[in-house]
Amino acid sequence: MATTDTPSLSDLLPADSIRFGASAADRDDAIRQAGDALVAAGAVGPEYTAAMLEREGTVSTYVGEGIAVPHGTLASKGTVTRNALVLLQLAEPVDWNGESVDIVIGLAAKGRGHIGLLSRLASVLLDADSAAALRTATTPAEIAAILAGGPAR
């Protein structure tokens, strides 16, 4: 159960931060789109996107099950104004350092909050059924239910 100190994953992912049927030319394009969506959500400054690309250049943010969770570097934490998630459901997968990715979840967190958020996301995203449900979800309510660990449909 979420408290005011620990918002639920779906609280961090409002409906207008979900892009169904998105199209990306490649991994970097998908990261840029996720970064732009975090900027549009008012969660980060525009320089955060470059930090997301920088992180990807040093360590892959692929987490498994066709999902990547790009986020900025420690140096970019000062550009984060609030914790937030964005989700790109790609119509066609992109190559992510040799892995096929069709769900991209951009993450922004203040301070060291990214560690807790990544842990909470991993518990949901590494479940094959949840990952499959994210691929076929068609509404923000379905996405929220999946992130809450409940029924996808």
Image (spheres, rainbow, N blue to C red):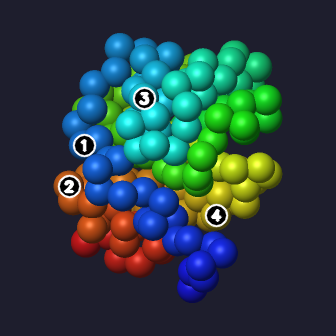
Q: Residue at x 36, y 58 (%)?
A: 14
Indicate which disc residue 36 carries: 3
Circles 1 and 2, Cβ within 8 Å, touching? The answer is: yes
Q: Amino acid at mark 1?
A: Phe
Structural distance between the alpha carbons of marks 3 and 4: 23 Å
Q: CA distance from mark 3 to mark 1?
A: 15 Å
Q: Which residue is mark 4?
A: 120
Image quadrant in which the N terminus is located: bottom right
Q: Secondary structure at mark 1?
A: strand
Residue 114, x across and y down, in percent: 70, 50
Tell me the element at label 4: helix
* Spot occupied by residue 93 in the image (x, y as percentages of width and height): 37, 28
Question: What residue is rendered at 48% in x and 60% in y?
Answer: 12
The residue identified by callout 1 is 20
Residue 85 versus residue 121 in the image, above or below: above
Instruction: Name the residue type under label 2.
Output: Thr
Q: Quadrant of the C terminus?
A: bottom left
> Observer-nearest residue: 150 or 108?
108
Q: Nearer the viewer, mark 3 or mark 4?
A: 3
The Cα–Cα distance between marks 4 and 1, rounded to whole angstroms, is: 22 Å
Task: Identify residue type, mark 3.
Answer: Asp
Do the numbered discs 3 and 4 sit on residues whose CB atoms are within 8 Å?
A: no
Is 105 above or below relative to 13?
Answer: above
- The mark nearer the N terminus, 2 or 4, is 4
Residue density around tag 1, few if under 14, some if 14–19, many if 20 or more, within 10 Å: some
Q: CA distance from mark 1 to mark 2?
A: 7 Å
**The quarter of the displayed image where residue 33 is located:** top left
Location of residue 107 by image quarter = top right
Q: Nearer the viewer, residue 22 or 76?
A: 76
Give the number of the disc on residue 138: 2
